[in-house]
Amino acid sequence: MKNVLFLITPGGHQDDNAARLPELFEQHGWQVSICKHEELTWQRDRVYCADRPADDYALIWPIGLGPQRSFLDRVNLLEQINPPRLLSNPRTYVSQHGKLAWHNYMPVSFVAASAEPLISAFEQLGGQWILKPVAGSFGRAVQRIYSAQSIRETLGGDSSGYWMLQRYIEEITAGETRTLICANQIIGSYLRTPSASFHANLAAHAVPSQTQLDPTERALVETVKQDLAIAGIGFAAIDTVGGYLMEVNIANPGGLGTLQTLYGKKVGERFMQAVNSQWPC
């Protein structure tokens, strides 16, 4: 029987993947084990999870990045495991996790940890802009920017981290398309239509619906999909609007449950077929 190890952080915000994925694997005949991210250890020249060698598993699937305090140490540990056993190349959790990693496909963007460089871009170029935290998710703290003062207030005080100023795309009012990729295969796409303002995240009450990628979106998704394969990333969500890439989530892509709700059982079947094609034993 094939076995999979899921690495989780109990109590962390992991949407429903920590419950949904193990259940789906069990339904398709996999033996499932679950371990905390920080239970990884190095013993006798091997990586262990709890008391079992990590290379005993056919597949190791981290859900989320785990506790920030030990993130880089755990990436180092994961790199010592035979690479084909891992969902994604561990280095990509450093190099490809973040909005800026995919800037070539995005609207014009500027990134800084202080207000003045972003204010300078805003004042020189004019037009409509969005301000969002580079490391943010679920649409938190994303806002339309109408004045330099708004940037100064957001990045002032106790604000920390890097922020992205990105050209506003009018097409967002019609919705954002999320496409899930697993093992270099498209599992499905759905549209997230804002219920108010411009927030297309389900956490911000956007409405999901069935959709099909138009030729422009399809070409962009296929290009990003090939980049994911080259980088060794096994599972990702690609968000697109009006021919632009908005984000690629490789840490803990949500949307599988939404796809199953919208399209039914065939989504789970397609997902597991992709998994089995990449990790057959």
Image: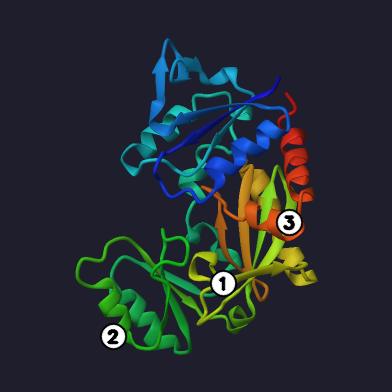
N-term mark: 2 or 3: 2
Q: Considering the numbered disc 1 on the image, is that residue within a helix, a strand or a loop?
A: loop
Residue 37 horizontal/vertical position (percent)? 42, 33
Q: At 46% across and 82% down in the image, what residue appears?
A: 129
Q: How crowded is mark 2: few (under 14 residues within 10 Å), some or many (20 or more)?
A: few
Comparing marks 1 and 3, which lies closer to the viewer? 1
Quarter of the rendering occupied by the N terminus: top right
Q: At 43% across and 20% down in the image, what residue appears?
A: 50
* Badge 1 vs badge 3, beta-carbon distance below 8 Å: no
Q: How crowded is mark 1: few (under 14 residues within 10 Å), some or many (20 or more)?
A: many
N-term mark: 1 or 2: 2
The residue under label 3 is which amino acid type? Gly
The residue at which mark 2 appears reads as: 149
Q: Nearer the viewer, residue 83 or 26?
A: 26
Q: Considering the numbered disc 2 on the image, is that residue within a helix, a strand or a loop?
A: helix
Comparing marks 2 and 3, which lies closer to the viewer? 3
Residue 206's disc number:
1
**277 shown above or below 191:** above
Residue 225 horizontal/vertical position (percent)? 69, 53
Residue 171 horizontal/vertical position (percent)? 62, 81
Residue 246's disc number:
none
- As measured in the structure, the alpha-carbon distance from the residue carrying label 2 to the one carrying label 3 is 41 Å
Q: Considering the numbered disc 3 on the image, is that residue within a helix, a strand or a loop?
A: strand
The residue under label 2 is which amino acid type? Gln
**118 shown above or below 267:** below
The residue under label 1 is which amino acid type? Ala
- As measured in the structure, the alpha-carbon distance from the residue carrying label 1 to the one carrying label 3 is 18 Å
Quarter of the rendering occupied by the C terminus: top right
Residue 73 horizontal/vertical position (percent)? 37, 33
Residue 188's disc number:
3
